[in-house]
Image (tube, grey):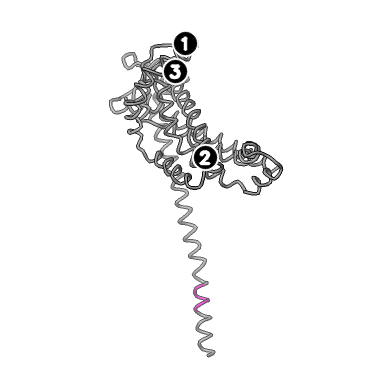
Amino acid sequence: MAVGVRKEARSITRARSWRPSGDACFQALVLAAAMTILVITMLFLLELARQAYPAFATYGWGFLFGTEWSRGRREFGALPFIYGTVVSSAIALAVGGLVGLGMAIFLTELAPRWLRAPLSYMAELLAAIPSVVYGFWGLQVVVPWMAHTVQPRLQEALGFIPLFEGAPYGVGMLTAGLVLGVMILPTVAAVSKDVISAVPQSQREGMLALGATRWETISRVVLPYARAGITGALILGLGRAFGETIATTMLIGNNPQIRASLFAPASTMASIIASQFNESTGALRAALVAIALLLFALTLLVNMGAQLLIHRMNKAREV
């Protein structure tokens, strides 16, 4: 009996002696995985900066604020593409953000149980559709509808406003922004739904016990409680709109000019890279890589700003 106890004790001691080395190996593996992400990001940035340097060295700050894009004259400016990216993404955020948030509120607060699962599935299905399919749908359905119905009526009613001037081409920033809004809708809806579902039920019950209506409960308790997560959902959607390429290239018109009208064809940072990079050499290639670097920096700044905003919201809620 005593011999068996001693053997068991020795086996336990040996197992414990292996634990530190096992823990060290595990920590080293997860640290290597984390550092791999950092290394890949740094290598990616360094390569972009290396290839973009000739453009910044040649044009300086004029590259950021220049409005000319001409292969023949070798004049390249990124401002038209920055403008097109920001405007089309803002339209997408206004459309997809509002509709996605409304869908999330309905699914979590108002929808009957039998309807929640089918609607959630349909929203997730939208996220799985390839962007080229959205672009094809936009060309076949949205562009004719915009050219023959929406844009003529908007021009007739609001043509005195510069935003709605110009011929109704169908393609343009407004069309691209609407389709982008549909594309980011499932992202905003899914994340917002999860965040709103995480609001404690006691918060709702307490407000209802005080005699509040369902709308007052949602607007005064649920949404303020979940605002940090909802902000994160909107930023995720905005990030996808910034980087979307194929659908935007098919629908925005690819005109490297700044126009006030939302009907006018334009171009984004992603679309100009997709449409011209394969045939580019020399100064044009350097300019396109510089635009890619600017797009990366813009997306990074937006995400960093969102993280800071969410952090401040969480701190304010704790206070």
Amino acid type indicated by mark 2: Ala
Q: Which residue is at the front of the view, 51 or 146?
A: 146
Q: Residues within 10 Å of mark 1 (few under 14, many from 20)?
A: some
Task: Please say whether residue 279 is one of the residues in the magenta stretch.
Answer: no
Residue at the bottom extreme?
1
Q: Nearer the viewer, residue 260 or 186?
A: 186
Q: Hey, what amino acid is under mark 3?
A: Leu
The number of numbered discs placed on residues in the rendered structure image is 3
Residue 104: image location, x then y, percent: 52, 39
The residue pinned by badge 3 equals: 262
Q: Secondary structure at mark 2?
A: helix
Task: Check whether the beta carbons of the residues at disc 1 and disc 2 lie within 8 A of each other.
Answer: no
Highlighted range, magenta? 11-15
Q: Is residue 76 visible?
A: no
Question: Around disc 3, counting alpha carbons within 10 Å, would you say few (fewer than 14), some (14 to 19), or many (20 or more)?
Answer: many
How far across and how far down the image is residue 56, in percent? 43, 23
Q: Which residue is mark 1?
A: 159
- Label ID, residue 309: none
**How crowded is the residue under tag 2: few (<14 C-alpha within 10 Å), some, or many (20+)?**
many
Give the mark, 2 or 3, whose residue is nearer the N terminus. Answer: 2
Majority secondary structure of the magenta segment? Answer: helix
Q: Nearer the viewer, mark 3 or mark 1?
A: 1
Camera-side residue of 6 and 105:
105
Q: Residue at x 39, y 25 (%)?
A: 54
- Vertical arrangement, residue 34 with respect to residue 313, above or below: below
Query: What separation in Å lies between label 1 and label 2 (alpha carbons)?
Result: 35 Å
Q: Residue at x 46, y 39 (%)?
A: 187
Disc 2 versus disc 3: distance between alpha carbons? 29 Å
Q: Which mark is residue 104?
A: 2
Q: Earlier in the sequence, mark 3 or mark 1?
A: 1
What type is the residue that disc 1 sits on?
Gly
